[in-house]
């Protein structure tokens, strides 16, 4: 059985309001997966976590 873990890779921001709508996680196998704070949005942009600090 494989051990999988992930880490928040980027913040997902609404293009119109610039508000945080989710996080993009990167798994240790390279897969990316969004985690939405509410419902999935279509008009988004991604910001590296380090740029948000």
Image (spheres, rainbow, N blue to C red):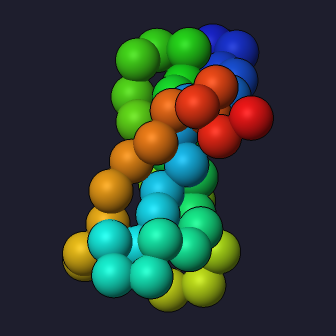
Q: Could you tell me how many numbered marks the image carries?
A: 0
Q: What residue appears at the point 39 percent right and 48 percent down from the top-left corner? A: 46
Q: Tell me the quarter of the picture where residue 19 sits.
A: bottom right
In the shown orientation, is residue 34 left or right of residue 43? right
Identify the residue shown where x is 51% and y is 32%: 48
Quadrant occupied by the N terminus? top right
Q: Residue at x 33, y 56 (%)?
A: 45
In this view, the residue in front, 16 or 32, is 16
- Confirm whether residue 41 shows in the render: no
Q: Position of residue 17 (x, y in %)?
A: 44, 82
The x and y percentages for residue 8 are: 65, 36
Quarter placement of the C terminus:
top right
Outermost residue toward the left in this view = 43
Residue 15 percent across, percent down from the top left: 32, 71
In the shown orientation, is residue 31 left or right of residue 35?
Answer: left
Where is residue 34? Give x, y as percent.
47, 54
Residue 15 vs 32, above or below: the answer is: below
Answer with the quarter of the image where residue 37 lies. Answer: bottom right
Residue 50 seen:
yes
Nearest the viewer among 1 and 16 is: 16
Q: Is residue 27 above or below residue 47?
A: above
């Amino acid at each position: 059985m494989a051990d999988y873990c992930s880490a928040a890779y980027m913040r997902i921001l609404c293009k119109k309001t610039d508000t945080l709508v989710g996080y993009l996680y990167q798994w240790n196998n390279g897969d990316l997966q969004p985690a939405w704070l509410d419902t999935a949005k279509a008009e988004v942009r991604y910001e590296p976590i380090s740029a948000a600090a």
